[in-house]
């Protein structure tokens, strides 16, 4: 089976830089996959795309060195299994708040006897190889998003669920839950993030986090996170376009601030 490069980098202690796609385009997905990212996440929760778009984007990512991940809209067995069948090598699932949620996520990502994933590998077989079914349980990643107060309170139990490969923090929803706003400073949620990171490191559990930009991603790497997402494709498009306009017209021209920086 085709290896999961994220698992390889985790095993060797190397930082993972993850791309995040909200724009429904196989063309841009292929380009992003060739840009040097270790993984590329297709976002079906807040991205402007559906399953058909995701399928084409996963096919495009397959032509690149990047590992394909998907963020599903919700904890739904059918959606998770279908996207794995489409070739995703990892599922990031939002709003996981309890150990039972985490167990349900793992069960949807694993074939029996480890889980309840239904047989029908489809594109997963094409991408992963002829031994996909026999080895998928060892390579596919189950990644719960930690972004609620309940999740913080239950973090040890969530990380204790067998089959969890990484926890991924959604900092803005966590800020909503704990600080009542996504605006900085966010003392309560930042303290919670530090607590989760410390607990994860003590348990040997890998960690990822969404970041608004490159500078924040660098700070999170220094803080100890294994995987960072330095913004999404839409943000990068708007920011680079605004820079181009300012470059032509000068520093006083109109520019767009960062958008959607809390995915």
Image: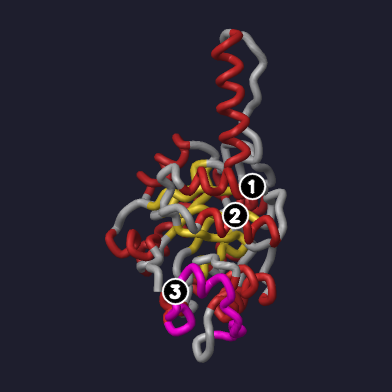
Q: CA distance from mark 1 to mark 2?
A: 7 Å
Q: Earlier in the sequence, mark 3 or mark 1?
A: 1
Using the rendered view, name the quadrant where residue 41 is placed.
Answer: bottom right
User: Is residue 131 in the magenta section?
Assistant: yes
Q: Badge 3 is on which residue? A: 129
The location of residue 202, given as percent across then percent down, is 35, 65
Outermost residue to the bottom: 113
Outermost residue to the left: 12
The location of residue 203, given as percent across then percent down, is 37, 69
Q: Earlier in the sequence, mark 1 or mark 2?
A: 1
Q: Which mark is residue 57?
A: 2
Q: CA distance from mark 2 to mark 3?
A: 19 Å
Name the quarter where the N terminus is drawn: bottom left
Q: 3 or 230, which lies in front?
A: 3
Q: In this picture, is 18 found above or below 89?
A: above
x 47%, y 71%: residue: 140
User: Is residue 106 in the magenta section?
Assistant: no
Does 16 sit left or right of 186 as displayed? left
x 46%, y 36%: residue: 214
Q: Which mark is residue 25?
A: 1
């Amino acid at each position: 089976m085709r290896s999961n490069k994220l698992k390889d980098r985790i095993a060797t202690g190397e930082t993972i830089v993850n791309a995040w796609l909200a724009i429904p385009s196989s063309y841009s997905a292929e380009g992003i996959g060739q840009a040097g990212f270790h993984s590329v996440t297709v976002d079906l929760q807040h991205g402007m795309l559906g399953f058909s778009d995701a399928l084409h984007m996963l096919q495009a990512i397959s032509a690149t060195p990047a590992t394909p991940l998907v963020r599903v809209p919700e904890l739904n067995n059918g959606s998770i299994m279908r996207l794995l069948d489409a070739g995703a090598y990892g599922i990031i699932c939002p709003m996981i708040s309890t150990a039972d949620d985490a167990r349900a996520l793992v069960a949807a990502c694993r074939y029996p006897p480890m889980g309840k994933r239904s047989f029908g590998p489809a594109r997963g077989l094409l991408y992963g190889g002829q031994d996909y079914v026999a080895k998928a349980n060892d390579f596919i990643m189950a990644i719960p998003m930690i972004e609620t107060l309940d999740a913080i309170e239950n973090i040890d139990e969530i990380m204790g669920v067998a089959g969890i490969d990484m926890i991924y923090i959604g900092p803005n929803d966590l800020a909503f839950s704990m600080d009542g706003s996504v605006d900085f400073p966010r003392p309560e949620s930042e303290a919670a993030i530090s607590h989760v990171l410390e607990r994860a490191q003590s348990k040997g559990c890998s960690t990822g986090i969404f970041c608004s930009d490159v500078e924040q991603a660098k700070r999170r790497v220094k803080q100890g996170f294994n995987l960072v997402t330095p913004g999404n494709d839409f943000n990068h498009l708007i920011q680079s376009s605004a820079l181009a306009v300012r470059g032509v017209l000068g520093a006083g021209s109109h520019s767009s601030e960062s958008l959607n920086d809390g995915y």
